[in-house]
Image (cartoon, helix red, strand yellow):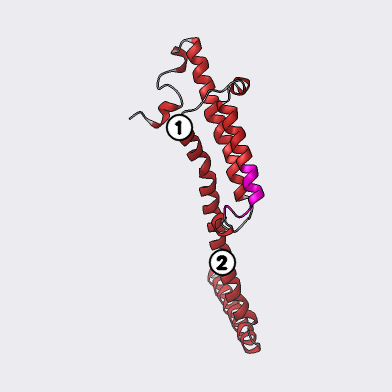
Amino acid sequence: GPGVYSSALPPFPFFLLPPELQEFALRKARAMAFVPLAFFQIWNVHNSRSVGSSLFHIGPFSNRPLLLVMLASITLQVLAIHLPGLNDLMRVNELTLDAWGICLGVSFSIIIVMEVKKLLARIWTAARQGQIARNHTSDFGSQGGRKKNRKKHKEEQKRRSERQKNEHNTQTV
């Protein structure tokens, strides 16, 4: 079948087209740019519901007012592309189902990217909290632990001081 990009622009140089086809291609390109930009915003509203929690943990359908606003936005977007007069005002052409699929697929990538970002942030935070907890218990867990740590620290300082003296003595000789 035809390639993915054949629904967006002709596969040959734009300037070789007659002026009426150049206008058609330009209007289609505008639509192919406009639709993903609008849908990026629509999908990103869901990402903004929580900084750290997954959209799928929160529930993508749990906020009914947001869903109604999204439905209204999607309806207006489709009308802007397909309603005669309005699409002339926007200077865009109607899109085929293939072109809509490309636009929606590209725009939906914001959900995937942000879910991966949130997952990595949760992993990093959990690892960091685990490190802090390990440090916290070893440093402040008990009186005996604190004394041992102070003693270790003093011993380490003494070893460093001796090493530095030895290095200084070998350099001066």
Residue drawn at 40 percent across, 19 percent down: 12
Viewed as shown, does residue 13 lie left or right of 48? Answer: left
Q: Quadrant of the C terminus?
A: bottom right
From the top left corner, tell me how far across and down residue 102 is, in percent: 46, 35
From the top left corner, tell me how far across and down residue 154 is, in percent: 62, 82
Label 2 is placed on what type of residue? Ala
Asked if the stretch drawn in magenta spans residue 61, the answer is yes
Q: Quadrant of the N terminus?
A: top left
Label 1 is placed on what type of residue? Leu
Residue drawn at 57 percent across, 38 percent down: 39
Residue drawn at 60 percent across, 41 percent down: 71
Given the current orientation, which residue lies at the most extreme top position?
18
Given the current orientation, which residue lies at the most extreme left position?
1
Quadrant of res 141: bottom right
**Residue at the spot of label 1:** 97
Badge 1: few (under 14), some or many (20 or more) residues near its Cα, within 10 Å?
few
Q: Which mark is residue 58?
A: none
Name the one closer to the observer, 127 or 142. Answer: 127
Quadrant of res 57: bottom right
The chief SS type of the magenta part is helix
Please give the count of numbered marks on the rendered protein: 2
Magenta residues?
A: 60-70
Asked if the stretch drawn in magenta spans residue 107, the answer is no
Q: Which mark is residue 126?
A: 2
**SS label for mark 1:** helix
150 versus 75 height, above or below: below
**SS label for mark 2:** helix
150 versus 166 height, above or below: below
Residue drawn at 62 percent across, 23 percent down: 86
Quadrant of res 128: bottom right
Badge 2: few (under 14), some or many (20 or more) residues near its Cα, within 10 Å?
few
